[in-house]
Amino acid sequence: MPSRIVGGLGLSHVPSVGVAVDRDKMQTPAWKTLSDAYVPVREWLARLKPDVAIVVYNDHGADFQLDKYPTFAIGAADEYAIADEGFGTRPLPAVRGDAEFSFHLVESLVAEEFDLTVCQEMGVEHGFLVPMNLCFPHRADGWPVASVPLQVNVIQHPLPTGRRCFRLGQALRRAVESYEKDLKVVVMGTGGMSHQLQGKRFGFMNEAFDQMFLDGLEKDPEQLASLSHHELMEKAGAEAVELIMWHVMRGAMSPKARRVHRHYYAPMTTGMGLITFED
Amino acid sequence: MGLKSIPDTTVFDLRLSRHGRRLNKMCGSLCSPANRDAFKRDEEGYMTRFSLNEAEKNLVRARDFGGLIRAGLNIYWMLKLGSVTGNSLYRMGAQMRGESYEQFLATRNFKDAV
Protein backbone atom coordinates (compact mmCIF):
# COMPACT_ATOMS: atom_id res chain seq x y z
CA MET A 1 0.00 0.00 0.00
CA PRO A 2 1.38 3.48 -0.79
CA SER A 3 1.67 6.13 1.90
CA ARG A 4 -1.35 8.11 3.03
CA ILE A 5 -2.34 11.04 5.22
CA VAL A 6 -4.26 9.77 8.21
CA GLY A 7 -4.82 13.00 10.10
CA GLY A 8 -4.39 16.76 10.10
CA LEU A 9 -3.95 19.13 13.01
CA GLY A 10 -4.08 22.91 13.27
CA LEU A 11 -2.51 24.14 16.49
CA SER A 12 -0.75 27.08 18.09
CA HIS A 13 2.99 26.97 18.82
CA VAL A 14 3.17 29.47 21.69
CA PRO A 15 6.74 29.35 23.12
CA SER A 16 5.66 29.57 26.77
CA VAL A 17 4.23 26.04 26.38
CA GLY A 18 7.78 24.81 25.80
CA VAL A 19 8.91 26.47 29.01
CA ALA A 20 5.95 24.95 30.89
CA VAL A 21 6.83 21.50 29.52
CA ASP A 22 10.51 21.83 30.46
CA ARG A 23 9.67 23.04 33.97
CA ASP A 24 6.96 20.43 34.45
CA LYS A 25 4.21 23.03 34.81
CA MET A 26 1.63 21.64 32.41
CA GLN A 27 -0.59 20.49 35.29
CA THR A 28 -0.63 23.88 37.04
CA PRO A 29 -3.92 25.86 36.88
CA ALA A 30 -2.61 28.17 34.14
CA TRP A 31 -1.79 25.29 31.79
CA LYS A 32 -4.12 22.45 32.79
CA THR A 33 -6.93 23.62 30.47
CA LEU A 34 -4.61 23.39 27.50
CA SER A 35 -2.95 20.22 28.72
CA ASP A 36 -6.31 18.46 29.20
CA ALA A 37 -7.41 19.38 25.69
CA TYR A 38 -4.49 17.40 24.27
CA VAL A 39 -5.21 14.18 26.17
CA PRO A 40 -7.90 12.98 23.70
CA VAL A 41 -5.76 14.23 20.81
CA ARG A 42 -2.85 12.04 21.91
CA GLU A 43 -5.22 9.08 22.37
CA TRP A 44 -6.54 9.67 18.84
CA LEU A 45 -2.97 9.85 17.49
CA ALA A 46 -2.11 6.62 19.33
CA ARG A 47 -4.98 4.93 17.44
CA LEU A 48 -3.89 6.40 14.08
CA LYS A 49 -0.29 5.26 14.68
CA PRO A 50 1.40 7.73 12.31
CA ASP A 51 4.96 6.99 11.21
CA VAL A 52 5.76 10.53 10.16
CA ALA A 53 4.62 14.06 11.09
CA ILE A 54 5.00 16.77 8.47
CA VAL A 55 5.23 19.91 10.59
CA VAL A 56 4.44 23.18 8.80
CA TYR A 57 5.96 25.88 10.97
CA ASN A 58 8.05 28.98 10.94
CA ASP A 59 11.48 29.56 12.40
CA HIS A 60 11.83 32.67 14.58
CA GLY A 61 15.41 33.64 13.80
CA ALA A 62 17.02 30.55 15.32
CA ASP A 63 18.26 28.75 12.20
CA PHE A 64 17.14 31.10 9.42
CA GLN A 65 18.51 34.64 9.31
CA LEU A 66 17.21 37.51 7.22
CA ASP A 67 20.28 37.83 4.97
CA LYS A 68 18.77 34.98 2.93
CA TYR A 69 15.20 34.09 3.69
CA PRO A 70 13.35 31.32 1.84
CA THR A 71 9.61 31.49 1.20
CA PHE A 72 9.25 27.72 1.64
CA ALA A 73 12.00 25.45 3.00
CA ILE A 74 11.89 21.73 3.72
CA GLY A 75 14.10 19.53 5.85
CA ALA A 76 15.74 16.62 4.04
CA ALA A 77 17.82 14.88 6.70
CA ASP A 78 17.70 11.91 9.04
CA GLU A 79 18.18 14.12 12.08
CA TYR A 80 17.45 17.72 13.06
CA ALA A 81 19.26 19.52 15.85
CA ILE A 82 17.50 21.43 18.63
CA ALA A 83 18.30 25.07 17.89
CA ASP A 84 19.21 27.79 20.39
CA GLU A 85 16.82 30.64 19.63
CA GLY A 86 18.46 33.03 22.07
CA PHE A 87 17.43 31.51 25.39
CA GLY A 88 19.62 28.41 25.46
CA THR A 89 19.11 24.97 23.93
CA ARG A 90 16.13 23.08 25.34
CA PRO A 91 16.94 19.69 26.93
CA LEU A 92 15.33 17.62 24.18
CA PRO A 93 16.61 14.72 22.10
CA ALA A 94 17.49 15.50 18.47
CA VAL A 95 14.53 15.15 16.13
CA ARG A 96 14.37 12.05 13.97
CA GLY A 97 13.92 12.72 10.25
CA ASP A 98 13.32 10.49 7.23
CA ALA A 99 15.60 11.76 4.48
CA GLU A 100 14.33 9.33 1.83
CA PHE A 101 10.74 10.39 2.40
CA SER A 102 11.79 14.06 2.34
CA PHE A 103 13.62 13.51 -0.96
CA HIS A 104 10.48 12.02 -2.46
CA LEU A 105 8.36 14.95 -1.23
CA VAL A 106 10.84 17.41 -2.73
CA GLU A 107 10.92 15.57 -6.06
CA SER A 108 7.15 15.46 -6.25
CA LEU A 109 6.61 19.06 -5.10
CA VAL A 110 9.24 20.53 -7.41
CA ALA A 111 7.73 18.56 -10.32
CA GLU A 112 4.47 20.29 -9.39
CA GLU A 113 6.27 23.66 -9.54
CA PHE A 114 6.62 24.25 -5.80
CA ASP A 115 10.30 25.19 -5.74
CA LEU A 116 11.26 24.73 -2.13
CA THR A 117 14.62 25.46 -0.52
CA VAL A 118 16.03 22.08 0.45
CA CYS A 119 17.81 21.90 3.82
CA GLN A 120 20.16 18.99 4.47
CA GLU A 121 20.90 20.55 7.84
CA MET A 122 18.27 22.27 9.91
CA GLY A 123 17.88 23.24 13.56
CA VAL A 124 14.34 23.36 14.92
CA GLU A 125 12.89 25.59 17.62
CA HIS A 126 9.60 26.43 19.31
CA GLY A 127 7.59 26.78 16.11
CA PHE A 128 8.28 23.10 15.46
CA LEU A 129 8.94 21.78 18.95
CA VAL A 130 5.91 23.03 20.87
CA PRO A 131 3.45 21.17 18.60
CA MET A 132 5.65 18.07 18.95
CA ASN A 133 5.69 18.46 22.75
CA LEU A 134 1.90 18.63 22.81
CA CYS A 135 1.17 15.82 20.35
CA PHE A 136 4.15 13.47 20.43
CA PRO A 137 5.90 13.69 23.82
CA HIS A 138 9.49 12.52 23.61
CA ARG A 139 11.09 9.79 25.65
CA ALA A 140 14.66 9.74 26.86
CA ASP A 141 15.67 7.84 23.72
CA GLY A 142 13.89 10.08 21.25
CA TRP A 143 10.59 10.96 19.59
CA PRO A 144 7.81 8.50 18.76
CA VAL A 145 7.51 9.63 15.12
CA ALA A 146 9.86 10.76 12.37
CA SER A 147 9.35 14.33 11.16
CA VAL A 148 9.61 16.50 8.10
CA PRO A 149 9.97 20.20 9.01
CA LEU A 150 8.40 22.49 6.41
CA GLN A 151 9.30 26.12 7.07
CA VAL A 152 7.16 28.97 5.71
CA ASN A 153 7.99 32.66 5.56
CA VAL A 154 5.30 34.30 7.68
CA ILE A 155 7.64 37.02 8.99
CA GLN A 156 9.07 39.13 6.18
CA HIS A 157 6.48 40.46 3.73
CA PRO A 158 5.71 39.64 0.98
CA LEU A 159 4.49 36.30 2.29
CA PRO A 160 3.06 33.47 0.22
CA THR A 161 -0.69 33.90 -0.18
CA GLY A 162 -3.16 31.80 1.74
CA ARG A 163 -4.26 30.22 -1.55
CA ARG A 164 -0.66 29.31 -2.39
CA CYS A 165 -0.36 27.64 1.00
CA PHE A 166 -3.60 25.73 0.43
CA ARG A 167 -2.39 24.53 -2.96
CA LEU A 168 0.94 23.51 -1.43
CA GLY A 169 -1.08 21.33 0.93
CA GLN A 170 -2.94 19.76 -1.98
CA ALA A 171 0.37 19.05 -3.73
CA LEU A 172 1.78 17.66 -0.50
CA ARG A 173 -1.10 15.18 -0.36
CA ARG A 174 -0.35 13.98 -3.88
CA ALA A 175 3.33 13.73 -2.95
CA VAL A 176 2.57 11.59 0.11
CA GLU A 177 0.18 9.36 -1.84
CA SER A 178 2.77 8.69 -4.55
CA TYR A 179 5.39 7.39 -2.09
CA GLU A 180 5.70 3.64 -2.50
CA LYS A 181 6.60 2.80 1.06
CA ASP A 182 3.63 2.19 3.35
CA LEU A 183 3.80 5.21 5.68
CA LYS A 184 1.01 6.75 7.73
CA VAL A 185 1.44 10.50 7.80
CA VAL A 186 -0.06 13.37 9.80
CA VAL A 187 0.22 16.99 8.71
CA MET A 188 0.41 19.72 11.34
CA GLY A 189 -0.27 23.36 10.50
CA THR A 190 1.07 25.44 13.34
CA GLY A 191 1.00 29.01 14.67
CA GLY A 192 -1.51 31.69 15.60
CA MET A 193 -4.22 32.21 16.33
CA SER A 194 -4.91 35.90 16.97
CA HIS A 195 -1.99 37.79 18.47
CA GLN A 196 0.09 40.88 18.03
CA LEU A 197 3.49 41.16 19.67
CA GLN A 198 4.61 44.67 18.74
CA GLY A 199 3.57 48.29 18.75
CA LYS A 200 0.84 49.86 20.85
CA ARG A 201 -1.48 47.05 19.78
CA PHE A 202 0.69 44.49 21.63
CA GLY A 203 -1.52 41.89 23.28
CA PHE A 204 -4.42 42.27 20.85
CA MET A 205 -6.57 39.14 20.47
CA ASN A 206 -9.90 38.47 18.75
CA GLU A 207 -11.70 35.31 19.80
CA ALA A 208 -14.64 35.95 17.44
CA PHE A 209 -12.23 35.99 14.51
CA ASP A 210 -10.46 32.87 15.73
CA GLN A 211 -13.75 30.96 16.05
CA MET A 212 -14.71 32.13 12.55
CA PHE A 213 -11.37 30.81 11.27
CA LEU A 214 -11.97 27.42 12.92
CA ASP A 215 -15.51 27.33 11.45
CA GLY A 216 -14.07 28.14 8.03
CA LEU A 217 -11.56 25.29 8.23
CA GLU A 218 -14.44 22.91 8.89
CA LYS A 219 -16.97 24.25 6.42
CA ASP A 220 -15.27 26.01 3.54
CA PRO A 221 -11.48 25.84 3.81
CA GLU A 222 -10.85 26.90 0.23
CA GLN A 223 -12.84 30.10 0.71
CA LEU A 224 -11.06 30.71 4.04
CA ALA A 225 -7.71 30.48 2.26
CA SER A 226 -8.62 33.51 0.14
CA LEU A 227 -8.54 35.75 3.22
CA SER A 228 -5.90 38.42 2.54
CA HIS A 229 -2.86 39.01 4.73
CA HIS A 230 -4.13 42.50 5.40
CA GLU A 231 -7.49 41.26 6.62
CA LEU A 232 -5.85 38.64 8.81
CA MET A 233 -3.49 41.16 10.38
CA GLU A 234 -6.13 43.84 10.83
CA LYS A 235 -8.69 41.55 12.43
CA ALA A 236 -6.42 39.17 14.35
CA GLY A 237 -3.14 41.06 14.89
CA ALA A 238 0.01 41.36 12.79
CA GLU A 239 1.58 38.12 14.01
CA ALA A 240 -1.66 36.17 13.42
CA VAL A 241 -0.77 36.12 9.74
CA GLU A 242 1.10 32.89 10.50
CA LEU A 243 -2.34 31.24 10.38
CA ILE A 244 -1.69 30.84 6.64
CA MET A 245 0.31 27.75 7.64
CA TRP A 246 -2.96 26.08 8.71
CA HIS A 247 -4.10 26.27 5.08
CA VAL A 248 -1.24 23.94 4.10
CA MET A 249 -2.59 21.35 6.54
CA ARG A 250 -6.21 21.79 5.43
CA GLY A 251 -5.23 21.62 1.75
CA ALA A 252 -3.53 18.32 2.48
CA MET A 253 -6.75 16.83 3.90
CA SER A 254 -9.65 15.74 1.73
CA PRO A 255 -12.35 18.43 1.26
CA LYS A 256 -14.82 16.32 3.22
CA ALA A 257 -12.44 15.49 6.07
CA ARG A 258 -14.23 15.08 9.39
CA ARG A 259 -13.37 17.41 12.25
CA VAL A 260 -12.47 15.39 15.33
CA HIS A 261 -11.27 17.80 18.07
CA ARG A 262 -11.64 21.52 18.57
CA HIS A 263 -10.45 23.67 21.47
CA TYR A 264 -9.64 27.28 22.24
CA TYR A 265 -7.78 28.89 25.14
CA ALA A 266 -6.53 32.48 25.31
CA PRO A 267 -4.88 33.16 28.66
CA MET A 268 -2.26 35.80 27.88
CA THR A 269 -1.51 37.27 24.46
CA THR A 270 -2.33 34.51 21.95
CA GLY A 271 -5.52 32.72 21.03
CA MET A 272 -4.37 29.12 21.30
CA GLY A 273 -6.45 27.13 18.87
CA LEU A 274 -6.58 23.43 18.24
CA ILE A 275 -8.46 21.58 15.54
CA THR A 276 -8.00 18.10 14.15
CA PHE A 277 -9.29 16.34 11.04
CA GLU A 278 -9.47 12.78 9.89
CA ASP A 279 -10.05 11.74 6.29
CA MET B 1 2.28 47.04 -4.31
CA GLY B 2 2.88 46.68 -0.60
CA LEU B 3 0.44 46.47 2.25
CA LYS B 4 -2.03 49.02 3.55
CA SER B 5 -1.11 50.31 6.99
CA ILE B 6 -2.82 49.13 10.17
CA PRO B 7 -3.10 51.47 13.19
CA ASP B 8 -0.56 50.95 16.01
CA THR B 9 1.08 48.17 14.01
CA THR B 10 4.39 47.80 12.21
CA VAL B 11 4.35 45.54 9.18
CA PHE B 12 7.75 43.97 8.69
CA ASP B 13 8.36 44.16 4.95
CA LEU B 14 11.49 44.15 2.81
CA ARG B 15 12.10 47.89 3.11
CA LEU B 16 11.91 47.77 6.88
CA SER B 17 13.99 44.61 6.97
CA ARG B 18 16.70 46.29 4.92
CA HIS B 19 16.59 49.31 7.19
CA GLY B 20 16.95 47.10 10.26
CA ARG B 21 19.51 44.71 8.84
CA ARG B 22 22.30 45.69 11.25
CA LEU B 23 20.00 45.33 14.26
CA ASN B 24 18.62 42.01 13.06
CA LYS B 25 22.08 40.68 12.28
CA MET B 26 23.33 41.62 15.74
CA CYS B 27 20.32 40.09 17.49
CA GLY B 28 20.47 36.97 15.32
CA SER B 29 24.01 36.44 16.58
CA LEU B 30 22.69 36.13 20.13
CA CYS B 31 21.62 32.53 19.45
CA SER B 32 24.85 31.28 21.00
CA PRO B 33 25.91 31.31 24.65
CA ALA B 34 29.37 32.71 23.81
CA ASN B 35 27.88 35.66 21.94
CA ARG B 36 25.36 36.34 24.70
CA ASP B 37 28.26 36.45 27.16
CA ALA B 38 30.19 38.78 24.87
CA PHE B 39 27.18 41.12 24.60
CA LYS B 40 26.74 41.17 28.39
CA ARG B 41 30.47 41.81 28.95
CA ASP B 42 30.74 44.70 26.49
CA GLU B 43 27.46 45.88 25.01
CA GLU B 44 29.05 48.95 23.39
CA GLY B 45 31.78 46.92 21.74
CA TYR B 46 29.26 44.35 20.57
CA MET B 47 27.09 47.01 18.93
CA THR B 48 30.13 48.51 17.21
CA ARG B 49 31.18 45.08 15.95
CA PHE B 50 27.83 44.88 14.13
CA SER B 51 28.20 48.41 12.72
CA LEU B 52 25.13 49.84 14.41
CA ASN B 53 24.78 53.56 13.77
CA GLU B 54 24.47 56.02 16.64
CA ALA B 55 20.66 56.19 16.43
CA GLU B 56 20.41 52.39 16.61
CA LYS B 57 22.87 52.25 19.51
CA ASN B 58 20.78 54.82 21.38
CA LEU B 59 17.64 52.74 20.94
CA VAL B 60 19.43 49.69 22.34
CA ARG B 61 20.96 51.70 25.21
CA ALA B 62 17.54 53.10 26.11
CA ARG B 63 15.84 49.67 25.77
CA ASP B 64 13.35 51.54 23.61
CA PHE B 65 11.50 48.53 22.25
CA GLY B 66 8.87 50.43 20.28
CA GLY B 67 11.63 52.52 18.72
CA LEU B 68 13.61 49.42 17.81
CA ILE B 69 10.58 47.88 16.08
CA ARG B 70 10.08 51.07 14.08
CA ALA B 71 13.80 51.05 13.22
CA GLY B 72 13.36 47.64 11.59
CA LEU B 73 14.23 45.18 14.33
CA ASN B 74 11.88 42.26 13.85
CA ILE B 75 9.94 41.28 16.99
CA TYR B 76 11.32 37.72 16.97
CA TRP B 77 14.89 39.00 16.75
CA MET B 78 14.09 41.56 19.45
CA LEU B 79 13.16 38.68 21.79
CA LYS B 80 16.82 37.63 21.72
CA LEU B 81 17.84 41.13 22.82
CA GLY B 82 15.15 40.91 25.49
CA SER B 83 16.60 37.65 26.75
CA VAL B 84 20.12 39.02 27.03
CA THR B 85 18.99 42.24 28.76
CA GLY B 86 16.49 40.62 31.15
CA ASN B 87 13.36 41.88 29.40
CA SER B 88 10.70 39.25 28.79
CA LEU B 89 8.23 39.51 25.92
CA TYR B 90 5.55 40.73 28.31
CA ARG B 91 7.80 43.40 29.79
CA MET B 92 8.69 44.63 26.32
CA GLY B 93 5.01 44.52 25.40
CA ALA B 94 3.95 46.54 28.43
CA GLN B 95 6.49 49.21 27.50
CA MET B 96 5.27 49.31 23.90
CA ARG B 97 1.69 49.75 25.16
CA GLY B 98 2.83 52.57 27.45
CA GLU B 99 1.90 50.62 30.58
CA SER B 100 3.66 49.23 33.61
CA TYR B 101 4.17 45.47 33.68
CA GLU B 102 1.52 45.17 36.39
CA GLN B 103 -0.97 47.29 34.45
CA PHE B 104 -0.44 45.12 31.41
CA LEU B 105 -0.88 41.86 33.34
CA ALA B 106 -4.17 43.16 34.75
CA THR B 107 -5.55 43.27 31.18
CA ARG B 108 -4.99 39.54 30.62
CA ASN B 109 -7.47 36.65 30.96
CA PHE B 110 -5.15 34.40 32.98
CA LYS B 111 -1.94 36.14 33.90
CA ASP B 112 -0.24 33.07 35.38
CA ALA B 113 0.19 31.48 31.96
CA VAL B 114 3.52 33.19 31.37
Image (cartoon, coloured by chain):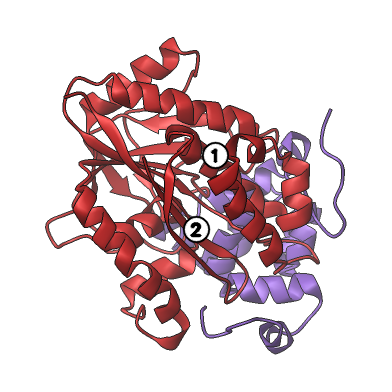
Furthest residue toward left: A141
- Please state the chain letter of the residue tagged with numbered disc 2 in the rendered image: A
Percent position (x, y) of residue A43? 25, 62
Helix, strand or loop at label 1? It is helix
Q: Report if residue A241 is visible in the image.
A: yes
Q: The chain coloured red carries which letter?
A: A
Q: Residues within 10 Å of mark 1 (few under 14, many from 20)?
A: many
Q: Report if residue A117 is visible in the image.
A: no
Residue pictured at 67% horizontal, 41% vertical = B21
Between B59 and A132, which is closer to the camera in this rendering? A132
Percent position (x, y) of residue A130? 39, 59
| Residue A125 left/right relative to A225 | left
Quadrant placement of the C terminus of chain A: top left
Q: Residues within 10 Å of mark 2 (few under 14, many from 20)?
A: many
| Residue A254 left/right relative to B15 | left
Residue to which mark 1 is pinned = A247
Q: Which amino acid type corresponds to the residue marked 1 in the rendered image?
A: His
Helix, strand or loop at label 2? It is loop
Percent position (x, y) of residue A39? 31, 69
Furthest residue toward top: A111
Marked residue nearer the N-terminal end (1 or 2) = 2
Q: Quadrant of residue B2?
A: top right
Does residue A178 sit above or below A78 in this rendering?
above
Residue to which mark 2 is pinned = A12
